Amino acid sequence: MSALMLSQPLAICCLIITILTYFASKALYRCWGFWWLSPMILTPISLLVLVVLFAIPLPTYFAYSHYLSAMLAPATIAFALPIYRERHLIARYPLTICVGVLTGLLAGLLSSWGLVKLIALPPELSHSLLVRSVSTPFAIEATTAFGGVPDLTAMLVLFTGVIGMLLCGLVFKLARIRSALAKGVALGASAHGAGVAKATQLGQEEGVVASLTMIFTGITMVLVAPLFAYLLV
């Protein structure tokens, strides 16, 4: 009973600290602009250090913090707003966006599948890895078709987005990609939310195109996940 009574305040503290850490890292990133201060990098690292340092059991940490992840599902509905708002851009570049969505979807799936075949990984990790290239709300929904673990999938999505955000400049330079449209499509299809944030820093058109590509890639992944699960798993 005493352990249960102690875990409740600790779980509430974990929720509060998680929220405060996010807003603190967001403020620091806006102030200084260093990539390692990005909320997508600083927040999970800070929380990981906290959990390990104070030996907080994961069930205790997620007792209330899991509600933050649950908010991702209804937040998906908000993706309809940029689609409606930027419908003129969709009408102007339908082929480019469609090709970007399909290419990004297939590249993400097949590269993950190839990695799983080359390296012996636990089934939970290998199945969760397959949807790492789409935004978290869509990935969590789609990973169940592959037999993945939603929490593990969310972590892999985070890592994929951060890596894409950090390496995009070098990739664009080596590939000599200068088109704002191409940069936006590439970031949205491969690095989802982090890619959209990076694309927005590059320019308004890049950010809008990346956002649309991310949304359509995620929707497509959810729709075709059962088919790809049948073919690949």
Image (tube, helix red, strand yellow):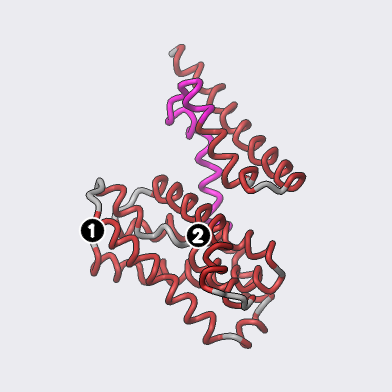
Structural distance between the alpha carbons of marks 2 and 1:
24 Å
Three-letter amino acid code at disc 1? Answer: Lys
Few, some or many residues within 10 Å of mark 1 (<14, 14–19, 20+): few
Which part of the image, by quadrant, shows the N terminus?
top left
Q: Residues within 10 Å of mark 2 (few under 14, many from 20)?
A: many
Which residue is identified by label 1?
A: 117
- Tell me what residue is drawn at x 59 percent, y 85 percent: 93
- Residue 94 horizontal side relative to residue 88, left or right: left
Q: Quadrant of residue 170?
A: bottom right
- Answer whether residue 69 is magenta in the image: yes
Would you say residue 67 sits in the magenta stretch? Answer: yes
Examine the residues drawn in magenta and state their main secondary structure. Answer: helix
Task: Give the residue displayed 34% in from the left and 53% down from the top.
Answer: 128
What's drawn in magenta, residue-wise?
A: 49-75
The numbered disc on residue 210 is none
Position in image of residue 10 (x %, y %): 54, 23
What number is the disc on residue 135?
A: 2
- In this image, 29 relative to 66: left or right? right
Vertical side of 116 occupied by 124: above or below: above
> Residue 108 lies in what quarter of the image?
bottom left
| Amino acid type for the residue under numbered disc 2 | Ser
Residue 214 visible, this angle:
no
Name, please, the residue furthest toward the right.
Answer: 31
> Residue 158: horizontal and vertical position, in percent?
49, 50
The residue positioned 50% from the left and 54% from the top of the image is: 163
Residue farthest toward the top in the current orientation of the protein: 2
- Please tell me how many numbered marks the rendered image carries: 2
Judge whether residue 206 can be spotted in this image: yes
- Most distant residue in the front direction: 174
- Closest to the camera, between mark 2 and mark 1, is 1
Instruction: Name the foreground residue: 204 vs 163.
Output: 163
Q: Nearer the viewer, residue 120 or 136?
A: 120
